[in-house]
Amino acid sequence: MPKDYKELFTNLESKEPPVGLFDRIILAIKREQELRHAKRLLFGFLSLSLISLVATPISGVMFINQIENSGIIHFISTAISDFGIFLTMWQDFSLAIIESLPLMDMIVFLLSLGISIFTLRLFLYKKRLLLNYLTQNFA
């Protein structure tokens, strides 16, 4: 019996891998890496755009409400309507305007607006990668 097994395995010819197999494997690995990168980019873009789409209008409304409640509009309208008094008392007007400025709401609004602009720029810059990913997976 043992001799039969030895003879069985000695008659086997060694098969060569198909020509170009290594290149196809490397190409498939690169394609998978590009697909993974595109998925990450798509997830990042969608999450940032969702955050910015929700945060920008809410923070804008909060900022406008705080401007209306703070009375800064009255200081600015007085400075514009009576420019002579504004020039003589510009330091007091400037300090009053700065004191009544809603800084936290302004920072939140500008931050959410900055995220919106960043995601728009990211989308336009990486549009090719996103479109390639969508056409590969959904076409």
Image (cartoon, helix red, strand yellow):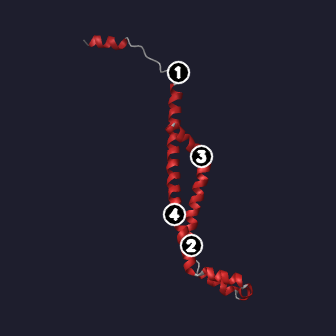
Few, some or many residues within 10 Å of mark 1 (<14, 14–19, 20+): few
Report, in whole angstroms, how far the alpha carbon at label 3 lies from the one at label 2: 34 Å
Residue type highlighted by circle 1: Val
Q: In the image, which is nearer the foreground, mark 4 or mark 3?
A: 4
Q: Is residue 59 above or below residue 51?
A: below
Q: Is residue 66 above or below residue 50?
A: below
Sequence-first disc among 4 and 3? 4
Q: Which mark is residue 19?
A: 1
Report, in whole angstroms, how far the alpha carbon at label 4 lies from the one at label 2: 14 Å
Residue type highlighted by circle 4: Ala
Residue drawn 51% across and 63% down?
Answer: 55
Q: Which residue is mark 4?
A: 55
Sequence-first disc among 1 and 2? 1
Residue drawn 59% across and 46% down?
Answer: 127
Residue 107: percent from left, percent from top:
56, 70
Q: In the image, which is nearer the foreground, mark 1 or mark 2?
A: 2
Q: In the image, which is nearer the foreground, mark 1 or mark 3?
A: 3
Residue drawn 73% across and 86% down?
Answer: 87
Q: Is residue 46 left or right of 10 when viewed as pictured?
A: right
Q: Which residue is mark 3?
A: 127
Sequence-first disc among 4 and 2? 4
Q: Which mark is residue 64?
A: 2
Residue type highlighted by circle 3: Lys
Sequence-first disc among 1 and 3? 1
Q: Is residue 35 above or below residue 67?
A: above
Residue 29: percent from left, percent from top:
50, 35
Q: In the image, which is nearer the foreground, mark 4 or mark 2?
A: 2
Judged from the image, the secondary structure of the residue bearing numbered disc 1 is loop
> Could you say which is closer to the camera, residue 63 or residue 94?
63
